[in-house]
Image: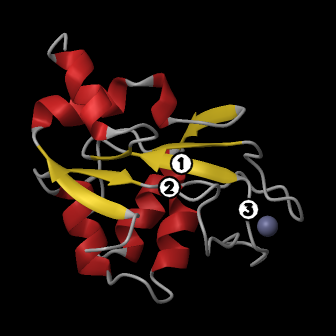
Amino acid sequence: MTSERETVEVDPTLFQAVYDSPASLPGRHRWTTPEADVRRIEKLLGMPPRTIGAPLWVSGDQPDCPKCGRRITWYDIVASTLKGVHDPAMIATVILGDRRYVNTGLPAAIPGVRCSDCRSPIDGLRSFKCHNWAYAFEELTAIQQRMTGN
Ligand SMILES: [Zn+2]
C-alpha cells in the first residue's frame, strides 16, 4: 500500500483511544443514525433485524440534505457505497466483526455519498464511526505515544 489513505486493523486499546478522541467526529455537528435507518441498513445488507446494536455516528458541517432536508445518516453512506465501492458482505463484516479498524489519511469530505431520498450529492459529511470502525484525524503514532505517556 503506497496510498496515504489506509484502513488499518488495530488492537482494541488503540482503537478505543481513536474512538474516544473528540477529533474522531470533526465538523460543526455530530449525530447518530436513528433507529429506523439502522433497521433499513440491516435490511439492505441482508441482516436479521436488530443485529446492529451499537450507535452509528456521523459528523460534518451539514447534517441535512440541502435539497430535500433528509437527515443524512449511515444509511445513505452504506447505500451509496453499495453502488460500487464495497459489497454488502464486506460492509456487514466491518459493522459486526470483532476486528477494529481505523481509517487514516482522510479527505476533507466523504466522497461519493448521495441522499437516499432525492439522490442529491452530499458533501457536508466529514466522518462516521461505529464501535469497531473509526477515523483517525491525527497520526496513530501520536495517539499511541499519548497512551503510553511517551
Ligand atoms: Zn435529499
Question: What is the crowding at mark 1: few (fewer than 14 residues within 10 Å), some, or many (at least 20)?
Answer: many
- Label 2: which residue? 106
Question: What is the crowding at mark 3: few (fewer than 14 residues within 10 Å), some, or many (at least 20)?
Answer: some
- Label 1: which residue? 127
Determine whether the residue tagged by mark 3 lies in a helix, strand or loop. loop
Marking on residue 10: none
Q: Is residue 81 above or below residue 25?
A: below
- Label 3: which residue? 123
Q: Is residue 3 above or below residue 97?
A: below
Seen from the viewer's position, the closer of residues 129 and 42 is 129
Q: Quadrant of residue 38?
A: bottom left
In the image, farthest residue toward the top:
149
Q: Quadrant of the N terminus?
A: bottom left
- Cβ atoms under marks 2 and 3 closer than 8 Å: no
Q: Is residue 12 above or below residue 7?
A: above
- Cβ atoms under marks 2 and 1 closer than 8 Å: yes
Please state which amino acid type lies under the numbered disc 2: Leu
Q: Does residue 118 appear left or right of residue 100 in this picture?
A: right
**Real-space Cα separation, disc 3 to disc 1, in angstroms:** 11 Å
Question: Which residue is drawn at the image coordinates 73% and 65% (left, top)?
Answer: 122
Please state which amino acid type lies under the numbered disc 3: Asp
Indicate how the structure is coloured in the image: secondary structure
Seen from the viewer's position, the closer of residues 11 and 29 is 11
Determine whether the residue tagged by mark 2 lies in a helix, strand or loop. loop
Percent of width and height locating residue 144: 21, 28
Q: Earlier in the sequence, mark 2 or mark 3?
A: 2
**Real-space Cα separation, disc 2 to disc 3, in angstroms:** 14 Å
Q: Earlier in the sequence, mark 2 or mark 1?
A: 2
Percent of width and height locating residue 28: 72, 32
